[in-house]
Amino acid sequence: MTGTCIPGSPAREKTRPVPELLAPAGSPEAFRAAVAARADAVYLSGKRFGARKYAPNFSDDEIRDAVRHAHAHGIRLYVTVNTLIHDRELADAMDYLLWLYSVGTDAVLVQDAGLAALAREVVPALPLHASTQMTVHNAGGVRRAAAMGFSRVVLARELSLAEVSRIADETRESGVGLEVFAHGALCYSYSGQCLLSSLIGGRSGNRGMCAQPCRKPYTLVTGGTDPYGRPLGLAEVPSRGPYLLSPKDLCTFRHLPELALSPVVSLKIEGRMKSPEYVATVVMAYRRALDAIAAGNYHESPEAYRDLLLAFNRGFTRGYLSGDRYDTLMGREAPGNRGLRIGTVTRYDRKTSCATVRLDSPVLPAPGDGLLISGPEMSGNGTGFSLNTEPVRNGAEICLPVPRPVSPGSAVSITFSRELDGRIRRAVAHPPAGTLRAVPIDLAVSVTDDGTLLFDGKIQRPDGNVTGVSFRPDLRMEPARSQPVTRDQLETRLKKSGGTPFLIRDLSLTYSGSLFAPLAELNRMRREFLVTAGDALIAASLPGEEELGRARERWAGLAPHYRSPALRGDTRRPSRLRLAAYTDSIDGVRELAAAGCGKIYFEPDFTLPEHRCSGNGTHDSCANRILEAMTICRASGAGFVWKFPRITRDTYLEKVLPSVPGLFRQGACECMVGNAGTGDALLREEPSLVLSGSTGLNIFNHAAALNALPGARLLTLSPELSGKEIISLVRLARAGADSPDFAVIAEGTGEAMITDDCLVRNHLDCAGKNPDTGKSAGRFLGIRDTTGHLFPVRMDGECRTRIGNAVETCLIDHLPSLLAAGVSEAVIDTRGRTPAYTWEICRIYREAVDTVNTGPAEGNSAVLKSLRERVRQIALGGITAGHFIRGLRT
């Protein structure tokens, strides 16, 4: 943690440390606002490789200036390089990291495991922070991040504060700091595990281009199913609002005392797409509260909370961090800014076009304010307008001119406050005296007998280190003829630091008091020293020339491997393609085994005690189901792999892991994981286990393939890769000594979202579920968008919602290309599907794989096209080749 009571501020003497306050900056203007509001650190992005591509972001020159400005004010600056990186981009990304290191960037936020590994090899002194897109949500994930060289982890937003504290306790020896989001927009899905925007329109959130489809309206529907699990007789399910996937905005402001006592090292404000005024408003509110907590005189400020509401909100939630879930976390009624509610419409006069509003807030609207009038249920976007005249007040009511008729009972809110906007703009442009962050200097000044002045300063840096600065001005004091500069006068001049980020904390002055110099010259001398101090502070953040030179030499030796990657690598390929399948039921295992599947990945769904409402059996039955699935696979000659879910919280793992050694002794020797933390936990339990990786690892380049899950037997490539990108990745990875095999999801309903929200809660009961599958017999669940596309929904044993793509992935006619690319395994995903579908789709792909492996290449095309039509006849929502043909939008 870092102490944030600033010498010279009202809370000069801190009583205890508080977490770092980390502010967003999507533009240079927002950066200056964050600095003026006294953030401890700022995070921003360059024009490439950042997860907010549609923010203005920063040019290289602007980043260099921001680093200098931040360091001159004692503020840390982090740069986000947190997208997934293509092989063709790795060299440019590494060039960029090396440049960021050279200009003194304090840390870089990274998602891509391959880029992180390369950075550790080239610039080990550059601090790395694991972006929330890495979906670290258990203690094993933090330990794995430490092994990868990360010094900080931004945890998944779905964790509670109790879970965060537990992870901190279990990973204390790693030295990794834990960062959590404290304010701003929430993603509906686990970050890094959301492909909805990518699947709908090719705009990937993992590449910084999320189109935010979660903020669009959807309808929850349910019905029966045909033998293949496709919907029949769909009916709409009433819900609280049409924006089923739209969360409220996170606000922990009222819970800062609790957060300040927690083991987190940084509180992060989300908002790189927001205005400078928003950034300044939020940072100022949190800064003052944290300073008060540090000083021991904290009192909740209703005025600051109102400012937060006026800045922007979709309704506030404490978030998963403080225990909010479901309806307390979701804002399904409307996806936009709700502002500050000030009253309710009691009547509307059609003649005057005025609405009478009963006030329930001390805040009154004023000309220039933006207002929103929305229906009694806060449904939809409502009527928004700018107020042009002073409202007429009559006691507890006001009369508002409105542009269109409104209904009694409608809520009236201020969504833009001209007063707040002006106040914040003034505070940013001209910060009040004593409120700017101050960098303390302990200064010793000596005046020799001949009038020479010597300055020796020690600057206290935010990281706790001290930077020395020496200065000898060109001014020499002369013997006084009449009125010498007294000791007090010189001391007063030397202590001034107004207009600079510095505060002369302690001054030691050696001076006889008998010399003279013009006061203007003494002022000039002091200003020159402070400029020199600023330069020294900036220089202290830069790497040494020797270390920078070594980093450049290391990269010069490695760079040729990463330049023009398509021309390099190992072109060997497997001689045969294996057929594998995912299933989540014992019935599915039986059908796949009977249909001739070569390898079966079994992902049993079971219920933790706190989620017994979902009716999926209990954790006690998990080991028995694994044994039953293994027995079926042995009898058919199919390979068996225990597949773990993408999301495996520590509460889940502590129930499952004790059964691992016993199952291992009985033959369960391979496990598939969707996050590195689960892999770490499994190997701690049974070091001889063989691991493979699912799509949750986001394997996007060959460096990630070699580093995301070291020692893995097989890795499943990201479904966002094109065929050409797969060829490059596999060839480059196979040039390494320990290359794994590679798998691609060739068939199935792609997983678009995984969320801790329970969509069916309050709408449908969980009764009547099959204890093996956890699904209600014959029931289809889905959400339908405004274009008519239907996205299937299934619930798991932890009340977690999994939303599938509206169309089924089908690469059956591309199997020869997969084999030619070096892919070893084609996977069909039958999770959530009926036994009839599971058997039929496996038989189709068994024939296709056999054709590819044994038939003449020239005759494959017609057979595979025929099989594709058979797939289409049983598919859910139609079929698509996904990104395999065109890839993502760049």
Image (tube, grey):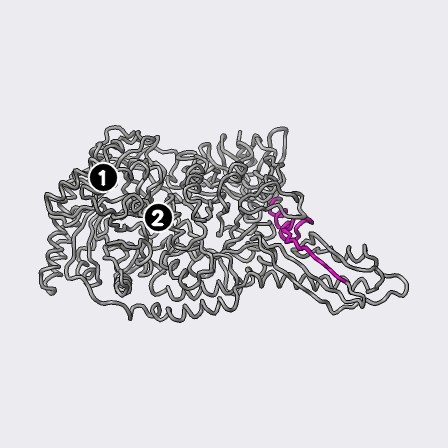
| Secondary structure of residue under mark 2 | loop
Magenta-highlighted residues:
420-446
Q: Position of residue 632 (x, y in %)?
A: 13, 41
Residue 599, x across and y down, in percent: 17, 49
**Depth check, front residue: 500 or 351:** 500
Residue shown at 21% from the left, 53% from the top: 746
Image height check: is 868 above or below 239?
below
For label 1, the residue is: 662
Amino acid found under the numbered disc labelled 1:
Gly
Horizontal side of 112 relative to 1 (left or right) equals: left
Q: Nearer the viewer, residue 563 or 745?
A: 563
| Magenta residue check for 436 | yes
Of residues 241 and 801, the one nearer the viewer is: 801
Q: Residue 427's x, y, as percent? A: 64, 49
Q: Nearer the viewer, mark 2 or mark 1?
A: 1
Question: Which mark is first along the chain, 1 or 2?
Answer: 2
Q: Which residue is mark 2?
A: 194
**Does 88 sit above or below residue 763?**
below
Local secondary structure at mark 1:
helix
Q: Circle 2: is it few (<14), some (14-19), or many (20+) Cα within 10 Å?
A: many
Q: CA distance from mark 2 to mark 1?
A: 35 Å
Residue 783: in magenta span:
no
The x and y percentages for residue 194 are: 35, 48
- Assign the C terminus to one quadrant of the image: bottom left
Taking the image as shown, residue 849 lies to the left or right of residue 406, namely left
Name the residue rendered at 46%, 32% in the picture. 376
Q: Residues within 10 Å of mark 1 (few under 14, many from 20)?
A: few
Query: What amino acid is labelled 2 in the image?
Result: Cys
In the picture, measured across the screen, residue 479 lies left or right of residue 346, that is right
